[in-house]
Amino acid sequence: MDTISHITDTVKTLFDQNGIEIPFPKRDITIVDRHTGKPHRQKKDHAIP
């Protein structure tokens, strides 16, 4: 195991043991119909998680 992996694994283990979470970056994008100015509604069947 190389040094970087060992450090990363150790930090992850310590964070888990202490209840520390780093949130995954998230960006919400709203598509607006330029004719109506209203947000586009996507069907739930095709929604991207």
Image (cartoon, helix red, strand yellow):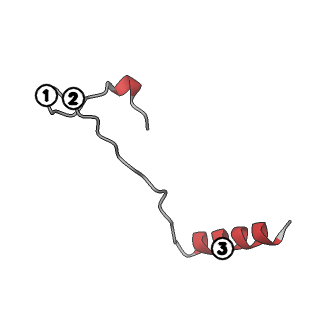
Query: Regarding mark 2 in the picture, which secondary structure is present there?
Result: loop
The image's mark for residue 36 is: 1
Q: Position of residue 26 (x, y in %)?
A: 42, 52
Q: At label 3, which amino acid type do we have?
A: Val
In the displayed structure, would residue 11 be above or below residue 41? below
Q: CA distance from mark 1 to mark 2?
A: 6 Å
In the displayed structure, would residue 35 be above or below residue 29? above
Q: Earlier in the sequence, mark 3 or mark 1?
A: 3
Within-10-Å neighbours for mark 1: few <14, some 14–19, many 20+: few
The residue indicated by pointer 3 is 11
Which image quadrant for residue 6? bottom right
Q: Give the quarter of the figure containing the C terminus.
A: top left
Query: Regarding mark 3 in the picture, which secondary structure is present there?
Result: helix
Residue sitting at x 13%, y 28%? 36
Residue sitting at x 29%, y 40%? 30
Foreground residue among 41 and 38: 38
Q: CA distance from mark 3 to mark 1?
A: 50 Å
Q: At label 2, which amino acid type do we have?
A: Asp
In the displayed structure, would residue 45 be above or below residue 37? above
Residue 4 is left or right of residue 26, and the answer is right
The residue indicated by pointer 2 is 33
Foreground residue among 14 and 24: 24
Residue 47 is left or right of residue 7, and the answer is left
Foreground residue among 23 and 15: 23
Whether tag 1 and tag 2 are in contact, CB under 8 A, the answer is yes
